[in-house]
Image (tube, rainbow, N blue to C red):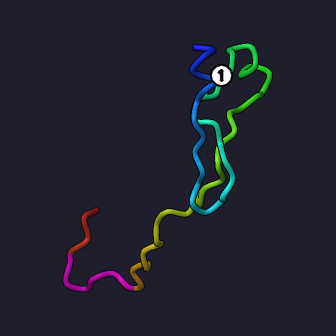
């Protein structure tokens, strides 16, 4: 595994243009200490908000 880590390739994110290791080794102890893998920042807003319905349909009966 160490050989794969030492000779692993990098990934270059198209929007960040910074290389990131494809393989990263993190132990359980390091995770518990708060260490995280180096990942490219991505856009978290991946959806479009739908327009809210302004008025209820007058033809539909109330359910309750």
Q: Nearer the viewer, residue 45 or 15?
A: 15
| Residue drawn 74% across the image and 19% down it | 32
Residue 45 in the image, given as x and y percentages of width and height: 55, 63
Does the stretch in magenta take in 24? no
Query: Please, what secondary structure does the residue beneath circle 1 have?
Result: loop
| Residue drawn 68% across the image and 33% down it | 37
Q: Residues within 10 Å of mark 1 (few under 14, many from 20)?
A: few
The chief SS type of the magenta part is loop
Q: Nearer the viewer, residue 60 or 52?
A: 52
Does the stretch in magenta take in 56? yes
Q: Would you say 23 lies left or right of 37 here?
A: left
Classify 54 as above or below 12. below
Name the residue furthest right. 33
Q: Quadrant of the C terminus?
A: bottom left
Q: Quadrant of residue 1?
A: top right
Q: How many marks?
A: 1
Residue 11 in the image, given as x and y percentages of width and height: 58, 45
Residue 54 in the image, given as x and y percentages of width and height: 42, 85
Q: Would you say 46 lies left or right of 39 here?
A: left
Residue picked out by circle 1: 25
The span shown in magenta is: 55-60
Classify 16 as above or below 1. below
Residue 7 in the image, given as x and y percentages of width and height: 61, 26
| Residue drawn 62% across the image and 23% down it | 5
| Residue drawn 39% across the image and 80% down it | 53
Classify 46 as above or below 10. below
Q: Would you say 56 lies left or right of 6 here?
A: left
Q: Nearer the viewer, residue 9 or 61?
A: 9
Classify 29 as above or below 21. above
Q: Quadrant of residue 39?
A: top right
């Amino acid at each position: 595994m160490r050989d794969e880590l030492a000779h692993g390739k990098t990934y270059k994110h198209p929007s960040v243009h910074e290389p990131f290791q494809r393989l990263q080794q993190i132990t359980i102890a390091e995770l518990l200490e708060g260490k995280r893998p180096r990942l490219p920042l991505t856009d978290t807003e991946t959806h479009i908000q739908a327009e809210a319905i302004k008025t209820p349909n007058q033809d539909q009966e109330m359910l309750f």
